Image (cartoon, rainbow, N blue to C red):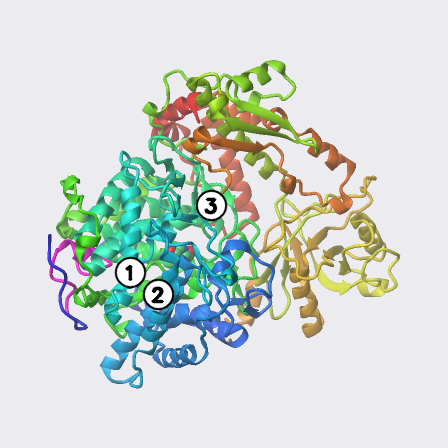
Amino acid sequence: MSEPGGGRGFGSSVPQRAPWSLVAATAALCLVSATSVWTAGASPMSREEKQKLGNQVLEMFDHAYGNYMEHAYPADELMPLTCRGRVRGQEPSRGDVDDALGKFSLTLIDSLDTLVVLNKTKEFEDAVRKVLRDVNLDNDVVVSVFETNIRVLGGLLGGHSLAIMLKEKGEYMQWYNDELLQMAKQLGYKLLPAFNTTSGLPYPRINLKFGIRKPEARTGTETDTCTACAGTLILEFAALSRFTGATIFEEYARKALDFLWEKRQRSSNLVGVTINIHTGDWVRKDSGVGAGIDSYYEYLLKAYVLLGDDSFLERFNTHYDAIMRYISQPPLLLDVHIHKPMLNARTWMDALLAFFPGLQVLKGDIRPAIETHEMLYQVIKKHNFLPEAFTTDFRVHWAQHPLRPEFAESTYFLYKATGDPYYLEVGKTLIENLNKYARVPCGFAAMKDVRTGSHEDRMDSFFLAEMFKYLYLLFADKEDVIFDIEDYIFTTEAHLLPLWLSTTNQRISKKNTTSEYTELDDSNFDWTCPNTQILFPNDPLYAQSIREPLKNVVDKSCPRGIIRVREESFRSGAKPPLRARDFMATNPEHLEILKKMGVSLIHLKDGRVQLVQHAIQAASSIDAEDGLRFMQEMIELSSQQQKEQQLPPRAVQIVSHPFFGRVVLTAGPAQFGLDLSKHKETRGFVASSKPYNGCSELTNPEAVMGKIALIQRGQCMFAEKARNIQNAGAIGGIVIDDNEGSSSDTAPLFQMAGDGKDTDDITIPMLFLFSKEGSIILDAIREYEEVEVLLSDKAKDRDPEMENEEPPSSENDSQNQSAEQIASGSQEVDLVDQESLNSHPESLSPADTDNAASISPSEQNSNPTENHETTSLDGECTDLDNQLQEQSETEEDSNPNVSWGKKVQPIDSILADWNEDIEAFEMMEKDEL
Ligand code: DMJ
């Protein structure tokens, strides 16, 4: 076992112990030398260009931070569309995502060390004073322990780390006397009651004022937490212990990590997504590197770097080996089951896994990092941002994008590792897309739907904590940062902790950690600093040569074709006796088969049918397994069905001054009037109709003539409103919800149904806005009088002329139950989910009602593509390739900004490329669970 690291001192080298740790420390010393060996490949970027981009990042940060401080502070977050602060309790609840908000000026604290990285020392000094003056950590609010740790505790510690660095330099922060650290300690003590479980795993939530147990706490009844939630504490808690000398924090975080390690699945060495904090049983047994697990792995490796404890590296390496064996299917990273790791648990990936290439750089495993990063970049090029989830054939699964920084983080680390200017170009694209699609007059707005370009009224604090740091550092030379970034490690929220902590207050004895490391075979693991000569064996085009074969992976993928199937995961020749797609609830033979498989069918009052499996009731274990397979298929079909029923949202884009297309609102479509899909759009000034409900002949036809009429929802059918405004000469209509406070951020969109009669007479486009989005237009009218909007299916690029006019403003998962869960207990599938029937009940047409009642699994799969996909594989791949090409061309036509090429790879070559996968896919089609 090696000794912990070197002494304190800025500019001194990182710990002088295991040379391996040199690369782990953000690839600081070893990999950075690759920058200087780079000689060819993508065109190098000039110093001027890098500086220009760096300055652009600074201006963007000012826009985001300035607007937060001006319009939101002291609230936790900025709502950039309505230009105000998000105060918990005053806005409709968004569920778990609100648990990050503790009424403690979250964004300010999360931004502290970003200010120093971006060389805004004066602003940092002001911000620290504000935190000390204004922030209260004793609010009666239930917050997430995980989020509070990484954002607030991490933010305070990052702020403290840089405050003492600045003080030592002698110019700024001379008055500082560890006040941020005292606050961090106070917060640390507030979080400790969460660890009062027999396992040592923390409760997921805590009341900042009342803790866990007190009746006023309103929390403490939870039984489960996510692995990342329990396993992402060690950096902040250990730093707190080492800074203050109070060892209890590091002890608690270590104990939680020890427990997770003990509970890893022993044959696969993987961990599940959620765990019972009392029993230690895995609640969700699917395992990946994204949501729910991500930073657990990150913290094992980084804990080794920061604390110099080899046991963390051994654990990380053991998990990493398992990840590369089971989850990594280059360029994909796909979830598997911890007990059956050869079995994929889903066919989509989430955006959080985009941090993983960065972690692989830290580990020194560059090739798979380059591959996955390139795949992600192609998804981004297609949709401008990484959707929250996307399928293995790179289609959007969840369309939101809350301005997550993970991809920028990996881009930064890959640039550090390879020195390849390609990654600078990638960063430039990220900057352009943020400015083009997410920038609004009052900050940057999360994307509600990357396909339409519509926004959510939300700018998360991690956008300031992480995105701007990584983008700035990507283009910065050493002299552009006022301290040596390589003396620090980034936490998962990109807060900076100094590496000298490894030798400070090391009073935590290793007796607290498990002692079984001797059992582990670590012969595969490299304990030496990766040599850049080996990483890039005299070949400056190394990274490019890895990326090149992946260039068309997104455009030309054969749907699901690149899932590697592990043949041993299937019983030979096994397939469920009844495929979900063939099932008919009225067929007695099918019902008999269901019974044998332990699946019962429940007819619900509303006409839906529900399937429930009790494995124990199956005729045999083989039948139980068949039942499990059938249920999994049914879940997939049901989810597909729900998606197909959902009409994509439409966009209302405000194009007049001062918005210039920058604000895009999510709107619901109508089942009548002009269909805005497929490139159709209507542009015009808006005018309120009189009467506002539009339920009778308008009394102000002159005001709405040739304009887009605003009408309030309620009191008559949507179609009636449409006819009245059309008769008055309106060229379109926007119905605004009369339920105050409603928003597409929190309520499901629906389509406005007709009135059950023929609606062919309605020819103007009609869209629906919830009240919050509607009030953005109403406020704009009040302020600017003339407000012009564009109604379409997808936000259009801003008018270049307008861009010239206006310089950038400087003012300021239920369906992922694991196989084991199903086998051991029961699972249910609703064939038709009420919420996905998107015609609003207020005016549900008879046709919709019929449709809802008659949906059955056998009808639902009548789509010839789907049937084709599962029957004839070779033909399928060819056909799907053509379909994808068509789809790709259509999207390209509709969006001039889409930059992926039309270069058509010969079909033979695609087939050759994927031959192996096609065979595997064929196997999967026979036996897929
Ligand atoms: C950040 O808060 C942290 O990086 C966390 O680990 C997961 N991701 C969010 C931002 O996407």
Name which residue type carries label 1: Leu
Coordinates of residue 656 in the picture (x, y in percent): 64, 67
Coordinates of residue 285 in the picture (x, y in percent): 39, 38
Characterize the magenta stretch by its predominant secondary structure.
loop
Q: Nearer the viewer, residue 498 or 690?
A: 498
Name which residue type carries label 3: Ala
Mark 2 packing: few (<14 Cα in 10 Å), some, or many (20+)?
many
Specify the quarter for ligand 1.
bottom left
- When the figure is inspected, residue 624 is found, relative to residue 375, above or below; the finding is above
Q: Is residue 578 left or right of residue 499?
A: right
Sequence-earlier tag: 2 or 1: 2
Q: Is residue 104 left or right of residue 712?
A: left
Q: Nearer the viewer, residue 373 or 877?
A: 373
Whether the magenta-drawn stretch holds residue 31 is answered as: yes
Q: Is residue 699 left or right of residue 298?
A: right
- Who's the residue at 46% across and 55% down the image? 220
Coordinates of residue 820 in the picture (x, y in percent): 41, 31
Name which residue type carries label 2: Gly
- Residue that carries the numbered disc 1 in the rendered image: 235
Mark number displayed over residue 389 = 3
Mark 3 packing: few (<14 Cα in 10 Å), some, or many (20+)?
many
- Who's the residue at 30% across and 42% down the image? 263
Coordinates of residue 138 in the picture (x, y in percent): 45, 71
Sequence-earlier tag: 2 or 3: 2
What span is in magenta? Answer: 12-32
Mark number displayed over residue 278 = none
Q: Secondary structure at mark 2?
A: helix
Sequence-earlier tag: 3 or 1: 1
- Who's the residue at 37% across and 19% down the image? 571
